[in-house]
Amino acid sequence: MHATLLRCAFVTVSPLMRALLEETLSNRVRLEILAELDTRDGLVRELAGLRPDVVVIGLERQESDDFGADLLADLPDARLLLMSADGAVACLYDLRPYRRVLTDFSADQLVAALLERGI
């Protein structure tokens, strides 16, 4: 059994990408899925009550991740992983706030980025 518990919410992430991320994370940490939301309507209100450690948000085609810093201001205890639909591009926002581009989007880098706090 994994010692680290990671409480996650998935927002506008395709079922396939969600399943891949769940499998990747659950092989390395104890994963608790708090929500799987298909829309961003009322997102802050919904997530504030759940208090997730990580919120994974799927970006629409050509959508910028610029809203990550504003969303983080409303959810300061969460880490936000914003990613393209194909998983080729991902950005992680943390309390600082800061933006980290994950250039080698491997399973090990994903887990490390989600569990470690930024400098």
Image: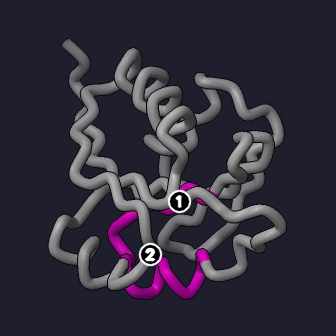
Q: Are marks 1 and 2 in contact (CB under 8 Å)?
A: yes
Front residue of 92/19: it is 19
Give the extent of the magenta segment. 68-82
Q: Is residue 88 left or right of residue 21?
A: right
Query: Residue 57 got which mark?
Result: 1
In the drawing, does residue 103 fall left or right of residue 43? right
Question: Quadrant of the rendered structure where residue 91 is?
Answer: bottom right
- In this rendering, the answer to whether 22 lies above or below 61 is above
Residue tagged 2: 40
Estimate the x, y position of residue 39 in percent, counting from the top left.
43, 70
- Precedes in sequence: disc 1 or disc 2: 2
The amino acid beneath tag 2 is: Arg
The location of residue 69, given as percent across then percent down, is: 59, 81
User: Disc 1 on helix, strand or loop?
Assistant: strand
Q: Position of residue 3 (x, y in %)?
A: 22, 24
Q: Could you tell me which residue is drawn at 41 percent across and 30 percent down?
A: 22
Which residue is at the front of the view, 58 or 93? 58
Q: On screen, 84 above or below 24?
A: below
Q: How is the image coloured?
A: one colour
> Disc number at residue 84?
none
Q: In the rendering, at what x and y percent does residue 65 appear? A: 71, 71
Residue type at mark 1: give it: Ile
